[in-house]
Image: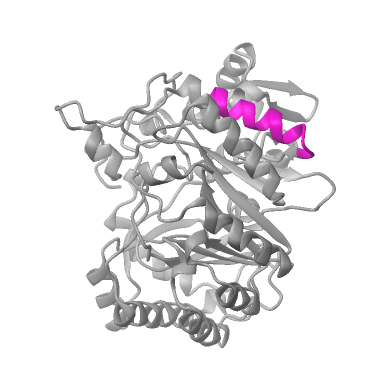
Amino acid sequence: MSDRSVQVSPEPATTPGDWKETGLGSVFVSNYPPYSFWTEDFVKDVPKIFDTPPPSADTPLGLYLHIPFCRKRCKFCYFKVYTDRNASDIRRYLDALAEEIESYSRKLRFQGRSLHFVYFGGGTPSYISAKHLRDFVHRIKQVLPWDRAEEVAFECEPGTLTRAKIEAIREIGVTRISLGIENMNDGILSENGRAHVTKEIYEVMPIVKEMAFDQVNVDLISGMVGETWETWKETVQKTIDLDSDMVTIYQMELPYNTVYSQEFKTPDGSRPVIADWDTKRAWHDYAIETFTASGYEVSSAYTLTKKGKPCTFVYREALWHSADMIGAGVSSFSHVGGMHYQNHSQWDPYLDAIEEGQFPIARAYKPSYDECMTREMILQLKLGVIKPSYFRDKFDVEILKKFDAAYTRLEEDGMLEVKDDEIRMTRKGLLRVDQLLPNFYDPVYRNSRYT
């Protein structure tokens, strides 16, 4: 086991508590144990998983494709993105991405398995040209076809879309398209470094609907710099008018590697003014109330779906139930056979590894059986409701007994309710669910660096 004494700078994502001011550090919990505990020591164990036979048919297989290119870097963005790559760079990257997927397809673990879901994330997948997209997809479908996939999701920035681009996205089999609109006020979009303007949203939304995707999602962020009650209410109403199938609402945070986080460290008073957590939750709560009054219903801590229209998010559901997922691309995360691992997070090391015929894995972690159970429990709590019987049947664990102190405290605080075979988050709990999850962490993972 590697030395864990190096963990520094506790973050909300690892520290139980009711955070007030928006400070530096990750809040959104996307995995457990925290990424900072992943090390090079475990990398040698990853290929062993690839050489094991495929698991039982009830273990879904997914593919995440990281497209790291953007027109601009948003000031709040903490993902691996590049804004300075030309067409030749993009072609080289997509070739490497395809080679990585081809390498996976030759491994015993993945042979004969159909993809259950595919997710194009970024960055901005819609940034690349229609030709690049078609050529890339044609190549990887030769080795990992997704014609029978339950969901193929694709993230878009409105200003990168044209009718031809949307047609290409539909042509490659995308079923779920997601537009990162974030806000409906041009001044706020500009201040926060977004490349698009609201005019572009209105131009592309009718075309997106015309293409009849199974699901159209739009993203909003509560608490962007410059937000006020007046502008937020306007954004909520204009988003309702867009009439999407699903709305995803995040609350602004400041992970360490964002532009705003760097400005936040400056001593000269030029740091951005970020709304506190009570304000962001109030805005988020207002949005939930307004959307539900307009025909939507809450489907997780972040999402609302239109009533009467089936709107499952397969990628999220599968990942939070421990599906196998190949994460391809620079800095991508994977989960295969219970093993977590991440690709190199820098351009040259990633491409060099691929071009040398190697898997570009930089760090990994092998969770214990108990940690796998805890991971599923905390992630599924973000859905708003879980059943103890699920964990009893799958892990032979009574979660209400194992985590009795945490569940009792959160129930007393009005964050959740326990009744029969159901643990249900209250609205109060859902609005701050990520800050509640560290209550369930093993003590060794608390008060540590998240990433």
Residue 442 is left or right of residue 42, and the answer is: right
Q: Identify the image quadrant of the C terminus.
A: top left
Instruction: Give coordinates of residue 398: x percent, y percent.
Output: 67, 31
Instruction: Residue at the far left: name it.
Output: 268
Q: Residue at x 40, y 79 (%)?
A: 94
The answer, for residue 430, to whether it is visible in the render is: no
**Between 262 and 363, the one nearer to me in the picture:** 262
Give the farthest residue toward the right. Answer: 308
Q: Give the x, y percent position of residue 83.
A: 30, 63
Q: Is residue 123 visible?
A: yes
Nearer the observer, 373 or 268: 268
Colour mapping:
one colour
The answer to whether 311 appears left or right of 42 in the picture is right
Side of 383 where 355 appears, left or right = left
Over which residues does the magenta segment extend? 281-296
**Residue 250 picture location, percent across and down:** 52, 39
Nearest the viewer among 21 and 157 is 157
From this view, report whether residue 296 is shown above or below residue 399.
below
- Furthest toward the top, the residue is 412
Q: Residue at x 44, y 74 (%)?
A: 128
Inspect the magenta stretch and tell me whether residue 287 lies in it.
yes
Q: Main secondary structure of the magenta part?
A: helix
In the displayed orientation, state which residue is furthest to the front.
199
Indicate the position of residue 90 as horizontal and vertical percent values. Answer: 35, 77
Q: Is residue 429 left or right of residue 267?
A: right
Residue 416, compared with residue 421, is above or below; it is above
Image height of 21 relative to 232, above or below? above
Residue shown at 76%/40% (left/top)? Answer: 296
Q: Residue 122's image quarter?
A: bottom left
Q: Is residue 338 magenta?
A: no
Q: How many marks?
A: 0
